[in-house]
Image (tube, rainbow, N blue to C red):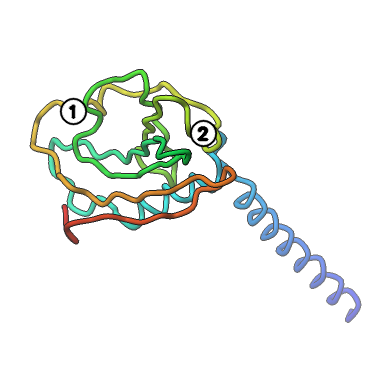
Amino acid sequence: MKKTLITLTIILFSCTEKKQLNSTFEKITFENKDLDSNFRKIIIDYQKTFPVKNPKKGNIYVYVAAFSKEKNDTIFTIIRTSAGILRKNKNIYGLYKDNELGNFVIYDESRLGSSQIKIYKKELPDSLIWKEVDFPEIITPESKFKIVNKVPKFVRTDTIWTDWD
């Protein structure tokens, strides 16, 4: 009887442990196939740091990363806008969005972000185009990163106001 009880306990514990390991493994292996995982994490962290607290009716909230060159360095800045996309542009890519990543688009004129962007999507819904319903928020925080050996390195965050909603 004791032997059977011990065997059942071991079997039950093994099944529970395997289920937990499987769900942990699934969480670890989930990766957005469109964006580099470090870049994606930076965008999600920015979205969590600067969330839309009090959305105004008519505003279109979108997070934007813009790639550019400064001397020989590839730079990208991240902002949040309530104006959506001012117009469709051949250099705006997205929409990137999933259960963790909010509305996010990329402006990349010369594909400078190719080490961070695996797939340049061209799926911008018309609902993201600004329709001039309300004056958009201005001077939102801007975080700047420099790409060093294909890895984004934080430079600084500039902001004038602490409350912009």
Secondary structure state at the residue bearing disc 2 = loop
Amino acid type, callout 1: Trp
Q: Could you tell me residue 103's position as x and y percent?
A: 34, 38
Say which label, 2 or 1, has the lower sequence index: 2
Q: Name the residue under label 1.
A: 130
Residue at 48% across / 50% down in the picture?
A: 41
Viewer-proximal residue, 138 or 10? 138
Mark seen at residue 117: 2
Is 153 on the left or on the right of 10, as rendered? left
Viewer-proximal residue, 9 or 101? 101
The outermost residue toward the left is 134
Question: Looking at the figure, which quarter contains the N terminus?
Answer: bottom right
Amino acid type, callout 2: Ile
Q: How far apart are the two marked residues, 2 and 1, measured between alpha carbons? A: 25 Å
Is 45 on the left or on the right of 85, as rendered? right
Picture quarter containing residue 109?
top left
Q: Could you tell me residue 116's position as x and y percent?
A: 52, 38
Neighbor class of circle 2 (other Cα within 10 Å; few <14, some 14-19, many 20+) is some
